Amino acid sequence: MSSQAHADHQTCILRQLKYFVFQFLQGSVTVATMVSWVCLLSGVFPEVGDKLREEIDSCVEDAPNATGSFHVKYVGTVPENTRFIVFLMSLHHDARFWEKPHEFYPEHFLPENVKKRPTSSFIPFSTGMRECPGKSVLRNPNCYDKDATYNFFNIPNILFTANGEPWATERKVVSPAYSPRIISAIDPTYSHRIRGLVDALRKRAATGEVFNLIEHVLPMAIDTICDTFMGISIDMQARDNAKYVKALLRIPDLFIERVVIPVYQPDIIYSLTGKKKEYQSYANVLFALVREVLEKKMEHRAELRQTSGASHEAGTKLFLDILLDKFEASEKKDMDLLTYETGELFVAGTVTISTMVSWVCLLSGVFPEVGDKLRAEIDSCVEDAPNATIEDCAKLEYLDLVVKEALRHFTVPFIARKAKKDIQVPDVGTVPENTRFLVSLLSLHHDARYWEKPYEFYPEHFLPENVEKRPKFAYIPFSTGMRDCPGAKYAIQSMKVEVVRILSQFKIASARMKPWKNPFTELSLGFGFTFVPTRGWLVTAELRNQSSD
Ligand code: HEM
């Protein structure tokens, strides 16, 4: 491995360790920071890490299920309940074991090469969890509770954070809101709402200025979610919407920041740093908007009741109708809960779609050959692309590859779960109740066993012949199992319709981002719900003349 590649890899691992090691450590700040240091240093000094892993393997008979204190030579006594992360990505790219650590090189597994490595250098399924996390954890019916990490949202009992029976009941109640009917609402809604976005992009194109694309994409997403899931028009694009955009982007950002930086976790410190106030101020902006929507909807339902006797038109019971029916039928009439449940969809349904639409458009400029191919496909396959429909988008095979590849790199970075009972994991045996799992989609989606060019932007990963070679759960941008994303189909279809409508009319160029070989070492990325470029999706837009470009 070249020294540059080695340095890149180290940087990448350090970044990930920073995020994931921190993510796993909650509780006392002192213990958390020191355990984090030990785990981090085991990566910074590979020989120490090796010695540690060797020792754990040799001294502890059943380390994944270790209970009570035990002695580890290079560390001392490690207390009961300490959690360890064995960072497979680092191990599986260690140049001492792998001839071509960063290349897809199946010959690594020729018997003569396997013999040269220690057995523990290849543990794709770990010694503690030997199966694809999608199957053994996310799809395990006893492992759908969210880890305590999600408490930092400070919003209990909504679908995203609830556990056990309350979660199961809520999921069942709201599921009809994600039915195919909602997909059929996309075309008319987008036709209506795209005008605001196109007008804004036209103005940007006229000045040629650099701008953050999401500032226009997100207000449109708020409008479309309100139209489709709430049945209420709030015309966000026509408003002075900067404070809403900021609030919706900062809420996930601050949440993740608290998750990954242990010092922010105790409430008192979070308050003292002013972060709690900041988080609350953005939540207040969001909840004020939600209350406005709720008031309008309640008035609308009251009017409908007067005229037709029903609170919604036949066959049009939307997400918010379901929540309001539940609210009206409940004795408690918990207005806060109703606000949180409605607000949840504002965040989950707008920020995610907007960040991914912005990514795809930005990437069409970062990789000009990708942009050219996308525009060529749109121009040749869709007759009236500025008004493209779901049916039109279904013909666009290259678009499908690009959207999937964008999601592979930049989807939700990780998912945390807790086993509510002892669970059986194939090849491992019993993993005890209350074990906490971190499923890193980042690692899974960049695992060199499944991806020919793990860190490159290579839409061809999703050509049918390549998909066929991978296990089904190697790609799970919307999670999998009982707690998968209920909005996945809506999200994919909406993203495609929006991207086609934008790219058919504008050529988007990247203002700062250059083509990369590894986005996690070369770009400045941060965590929102999905990965985000820390300086925003900075682009310029050029109005297209389809006959000449
Ligand atoms: C590109 C867009 C999207 C991506 C990548 C995405 C991804 C995900 C992922 C990975 C999860 C699991 C999170 C976890 O378990 O911690 C999730 C859950 C969820 N998503 Fe999405 N999502 C997207 C769009 C949407 C949309 C459009 C909606 C609603 C309209 C939505 C609503 C939800 C909800 C309510 C949950 C919680 C489900 C539960 O816990 O039962 N998402 N999403």
Image (spheres, helix red, strand yellow):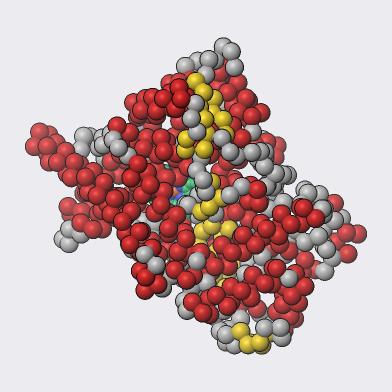
In the image shown, does 279 or 393 lie closer to the viewer? 279
Q: Where's residue 327, x and y in %?
A: 20, 54
Please state, as top left, top right, bottom left or bottom right, where the N terminus lies in the image. bottom right
Q: Residue furthest top?
A: 547
Vertical order, 74 against 297 (above or below): below
The answer to whether 545 appears left or right of 452 in the picture is left
Q: Where's residue 309, x and y in %?
A: 11, 38
Vertical order, 272 against 452 (above or below): below
Q: Where's residue 88, x and y in %?
A: 69, 63
- Residue sitting at x 83%, y 63%: 96
The answer to whether 32 appears left or right of 14 in the picture is left
- Residue sitting at x 67%, y 42%: 516
The answer, for residue 471, to whether it is visible in the render is no
- Residue sitting at x 56%, y 30%: 509
The answer, for residue 233, to whether it is visible in the render is yes
Please state, as top left, top right, bottom left or bottom right, where the C terminus lies in the image. top right
Q: Where's residue 225, x and y in %?
A: 34, 39
Q: Residue 60 is drawn in which quadrant? A: bottom right
Vertical order, 81 against 272 (above or below): below
The answer to whether 392 appears left or right of 189 in the picture is right
- Residue sitting at x 23%, y 43%: 293
The answer to whether 163 appears left or right of 415 in the picture is left
